[in-house]
Every structure is written in structure tokens, then in C-alpha cells.
Image (cartoon, rainbow, N blue to C red):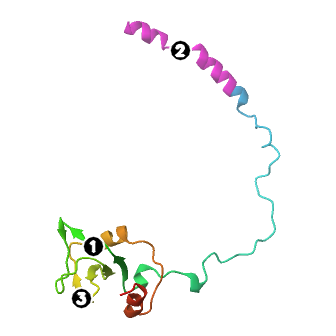
Amino acid sequence: MFHRIRRRAKGPSEAQRQFAEVFARMQNQVPAGFAGQSAAPEPTERVAVVDDFLPPELRVPSHDQLDGRMMPWKQPLVLDGEMVACAECGEYRDWLILSTRDEIWLRCRAGHQQQETRLDTAWYNRHAGPADATHATFEDCLHHLGH
């Protein structure tokens, strides 16, 4: 059986010969529409360069230009199956979550702050929405968020 297969494979098949003939005839042909084009593009009118960046008053500062970010968290915060409560007053909902210098801080409505080591910046970035405002001071941001 293998002898028969090897015998057949010695020369090109009829289909391969036909393809080689057609390929040889088409070798130096150029498709219609391509023959009249020149290699160098024609000079065009000069286009004015436009600055595509937003004006400074509309630009959002990057993360390295901010001292931190914060977001409200109205519902109870559950970490590792345990509800987080304020260490001083026992409040367990209506948090402000602050992200600054790769640390996460929780601030209750009474103004007590505690660092939460079980959260990281990646968690904050997953749960925070887009920033709706930037503020010059921490107090301005607290006032904006209603605390």
C-alpha cells in the first residue's frame, strides 16, 4: 500500500500542473486600476495642525497629581465575612472610603478615621466610579460628599 502512495507522489498532479501554468501566465500582469498609479503620492494642500488636547480647564488630573481620592459607601462594608464597624463609635454604614498613598482609610459620619488593611488600591479602583469633581482641600471634598 505504501509503495502505491510513493509511486503516485513522484510527479505533480494534473491540478498542480494547471495551477503552475495559470500562475506563470499571470506572473507579469497588473490588475485593472493599478497600472495608472504612480509610486509617489501627489502633493496636496497643507493641512493646519490642530492641538487635539483638551484645554487646561477641562483636563482631569492624573492619579500622580492628586493627593488622594474618596468615594461614598452607603451600605455596610463586609470584608472576609465580617461587617466593618467604626472602632470609636460603632457605626457600620455610610462610610467615606479614602485612597491615598496606596492605603485605604475609612471615615464614618462622625469623622473618625481608621485604616483598612484588608482593602487595597486595586479594590478601590474596581469599586469607584468616575470622578465627578476635583477639590483643592480635603474639607471641600468632605463638604461636596455631604460629610
**Which three-letter amino acid code belongs to the residue tagged 3?**
His
Left or right, 40 with reference to 16: right
Sort mark 2 into few (<14), some (14-19) or many (20+) by Cα contacts within 10 Å. few
Q: Position of residue 107 (x, y in %)?
A: 27, 84
For the residues labelled 3 and 2, the Cα–Cα distance comes to 88 Å
The residue pinned by badge 1 equals 120
Q: Position of residue 52 (x, y in %)?
A: 63, 75
Q: Where does the N terminus fall, quadrant-wise? A: top left
In this picture, is 113 found above or below 84? below
For marks 3 and 1, the one nearer the N-term is 3
Which label sits in the foreground, 1 or 2? 1
The reply to whether the C-beta atoms of the residues labelled 3 and 1 are less than 8 Å apart is no
Q: Position of residue 7 (x, y in %)?
A: 46, 9
**Which three-letter amino acid code belongs to the residue tagged 1?**
Asp
Choose top left, top right, bottom left or bottom right for residue 136.
bottom left
Q: Which mark is residue 112?
A: 3
Q: Which mark is residue 11?
A: 2
Q: Magenta span: helix, strand or loop, mainly?
A: helix
Choose top left, top right, bottom left or bottom right for residue 21.
top right
Is residue 98 found inside the magenta-colored segment of the image?
A: no
| Residue in front for this viewpoint, 26 or 93 | 93
Q: Which residues are magenta?
A: 1-23
For the residues labelled 1 and 2, the Cα–Cα distance comes to 69 Å
Residue at point 26%, 81% (across, down): 106
| Residue in front for this viewpoint, 110 or 117 | 110
